[in-house]
Amino acid sequence: MMLEISPIRKLRLACVAVFAWLAVQAFGAQALAAEPAAAPSAAAPVRVVFETSEGRIVVEVLPDKAPKTVANFVQYVKDGFYDGTIFHRVIKGFMIQGGGFTPAMVQKPTRPPVPIESNNGQKNVRGSVAMARTSDPNSATAQFFINVVDNAFLDYPGQDGAGYTVFGRVVEGMDVVDKIRAVPTGGGDVPRTPVLIKSARIAQ
């Protein structure tokens, strides 16, 4: 014979069941909250390897600091634009500049210029890589330079209110850069013996 449960007892049992369910849900939520969130994987740095007549130089670019400049530079690398160009302007106590001329001092045609991104917090310190340009701040195309000393006067806003866009840094081969800065030069600071960029490739 089954005993009949009173309506009040039924109500009490229902309340207990509801509270028990809520407790389980709350505990589960706390357990989930206690689990540390997976850290986002950092994108691998993009590096460009220059094989030159003086040795290897590896540059790490900074897409988070100069996105348009880096995209432009990387596209020139992928296109093979820098292969066979030279460091055509070398000033021992300043910088080495390249990426625009052949050994015969013929300037290569380029794509349209990119807008300046010099106001990005990066400094023209020794080993930094920046875009060369004319007096027009928004005239940078393919030519770049590597600072061989700290050149604070090139930092934004510089002497012309714009400065020069730093978009990368040398992470390997500063000894090669120093070899290049020491080569004999002639008129226009052009090396007497061409310093060749044999190839430029994205590091794998």
Image: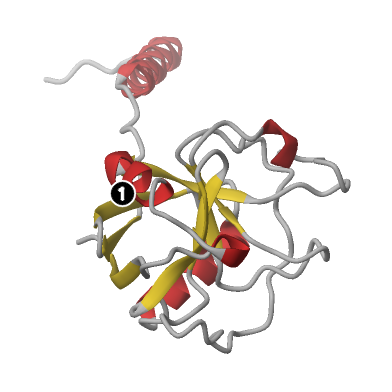
**Left or right of residue 149: residue 151:** right
Write the residue at 38% across / 10% down: 9
Q: Is residue 40 above or below residue 166?
A: above
Q: Is residue 84 above or below residue 182?
A: below
Residue 86 seen by the camera: yes
Q: Quadrant of the C terminus?
A: bottom left
Amino acid at dot 1: Ala
Residue 43 seen by the camera: no
* 124, 63: nearer the viewer: 124
Q: Badge 1: few (under 14), some or many (20 or more) residues near its Cα, within 10 Å?
A: few
Q: Is residue 30 above or below residue 66?
A: above
Circle 1 is placed at which residue position? 44
Structure colour scheme:
secondary structure
**Left or right of residue 83: residue 62:** right
Element marked by disc 1: loop
* 131, 68: nearer the viewer: 131
Residue 121 on image: x %, y %:
66, 35
* 77, 177: nearer the viewer: 177
Instruction: Please identify the quarter of the rendering in which residue 133 is found.
Output: bottom right
Write the residue at 58% across / 58% down: 67
Residue 150 on image: x %, y %:
57, 31
**Left or right of residue 57: residue 108:** right
* 93, 62: nearer the viewer: 93
Instruction: Please identify the quarter of the rendering in which residue 80 is found.
Output: bottom left
Residue 162 on image: x %, y %:
82, 49
Q: Quadrant of the N terminus?
A: top left
Q: Residue furthest right?
A: 161
